Amino acid sequence: MQVFYLPGKAAIKSALASVSQGQTLDPQGSLTRLCERRRKQEGIDKNNPMLLDGVGNIQEAVVKLKRTGFERELLLIDTPGSMMPLIRAAIGVADCIILPLQASLLDIEAQEDAAEAVNDASKLDRLLVVLTRVDARVGVDDAVNLTTRRFGKAPLQIRQRVAYARAHIAGRTGAEFDKECARETAELWAAVRTILRS
């Protein structure tokens, strides 16, 4: 089973889950509400992503998935952005770490502890930095340069699109709702696969 660690940003979690058939822990509840809306929609897989409730930690989640016959190739782990013991535990078992950041100095600095945890675990090669909500009208060169210097690689960028918000309202993902969102999700998923193959 491959494990992903994602600190926040429900759009990335739901996008990956929609193409990866993953299982997801959701401490913030964003993905829980998305799944509730999906169950009301026609013509989509209502169990993808599937929520796993009543789990205290990552190890319990894996055991529960195996015991109930729902083990999958991928397990997406979402953590709150500031709970370092939980973040370190997730990074410790992760095959791929996705660090979503908004293209602002404050957001990048706010994730410095998570970045240090990735470095401490010697997993910079497993890290994918993603700038989210990138406004096409505003340059993000400073954020790209800062994240490239900090992590040694350029970040992937996901644009700010109304389609992502509209998709969530409809209980769908951006990739199911809009072809530009689908293209961005495909690029994200290709970057994840590259990390998993290395």
Image (tube, grey):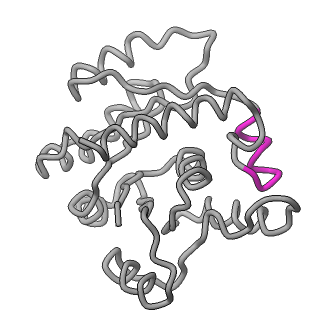
**Quadrant, the C terminus:** top left
Is residue 27 something that shows in the picture? no
- State the image quarter where residue 119 is shown: top left
Residue 60 vertical position relative to residue 44 in the rendered view, above or below: below
What range of the chain is rendered magenta? 163-172
Q: Residue at x 46, y 29 (%)?
A: 131
**Residue sitting at the far bottom:** 67
Q: Residue at x 77, y 62 (%)?
A: 38
The image shows residue 156 at horizontal and vertical percentages of 43, 27
**Quadrant, the N terminus:** bottom left
Q: Residue at x 28, y 58 (%)?
A: 94
Residue 93 vertical position relative to residue 17 in the rendered view, above or below: below
**In the rendered view, does 48 fall on the left or right side of 154?**
right
The image shows residue 87 at horizontal and vertical percentages of 30, 59
The image shows residue 117 at horizontal and vertical percentages of 19, 50
Is residue 123 something that shows in the picture? yes
